[in-house]
Image: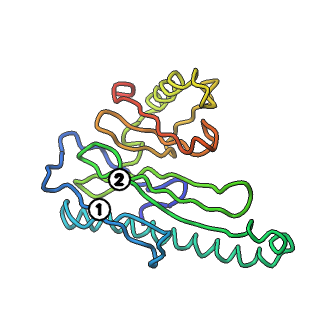
Amino acid sequence: MKKSWFIPLLSATLLLPSTFSVDAATKPTVITKYAKEKKTLKYPYVTKGPSTSVQKTINADLTDFSKFAYENYLEIEAFEKEERKTSYCKKNPSMCNYTYSTSYKVTGNNTSYLTFTLSDYSYTGGAHGFGYKYGVNYSLKTGKEVPITSVLKTSTQFKKVEKYIYNKLKNNDDYFVDTLGDVDVSKKSEYLMMKDGIKVVFQSYEIAPYSTGQPEIFVPKSVYN
């Protein structure tokens, strides 16, 4: 596959199309599928809209995500089986009900792209589980993913985005943003393509407490262009 799931995602490099847009007739239709028929392992699949070749390219990558999810599911299932043999799990069986699940949302509002958030969540003991949110942006012209480096092409652009997010959040007590160094946006960052900019996705604990989840901070195009 083109992407190495779980930090970072796709490593494709392509330039953003400047004039391409998608009309209503080619708007993608997305259905839910399940990895190996496991209802907790949801992933999206495109059935209508873009050309057959574009659908095939997008679905090949999404199918790879489903394989990644199923492999994680099996690993956690095997881990739970071994842990249940320990004295701790025998004394605290409810703490050893390990889980792994995936979900998705169709998001973004740029009609030239099909944008998803793909999320996975695992619980392997402790106070709570851990999740990761992927931002995936497919060009509806090529079917390939558009990495953040096709939007932010220079270190100056990355720094402008960091400064904008810092200024936006520095006085908000709901976030852990006290200095500019608390905001890290890099080529490994997840993002969502929007009509007038991007949303930068931050993982749990990066800039906010666990209860906040994985914040998506909108950055207008005018900030980095």
Q: Is residue 3 above or below residue 19?
A: below
Residue assigned mark 1: 30
Q: Looking at this view, is 99 or 191 the one in front? A: 99
- Contact between labelled residues 1 and 2, with CB atoms less than 8 Å apart: yes
Q: Amino acid at mark 2?
A: Val
Q: Amino acid at mark 1?
A: Val
The quadrant of the picture occupied by the C terminus is: top left
Q: Secondary structure at mark 1?
A: strand
Is 184 situated left or right of 88 in this image?
Answer: left
Q: Count the labels in the image.
A: 2
Where does residue 215 sit, x and y in percent of width and height?
Answer: 51, 40
Going 77% across and 71% down the picture, which residue do you hit?
93
Where does residue 176 sit, x and y in percent of width and height?
Answer: 63, 31
Going 80% across and 68% down the picture, which residue do you hit?
92
Q: Which mark is residue 14?
A: none
Q: Is residue 168 above or below residue 48?
A: above
Q: Which mark is residue 106?
A: 2
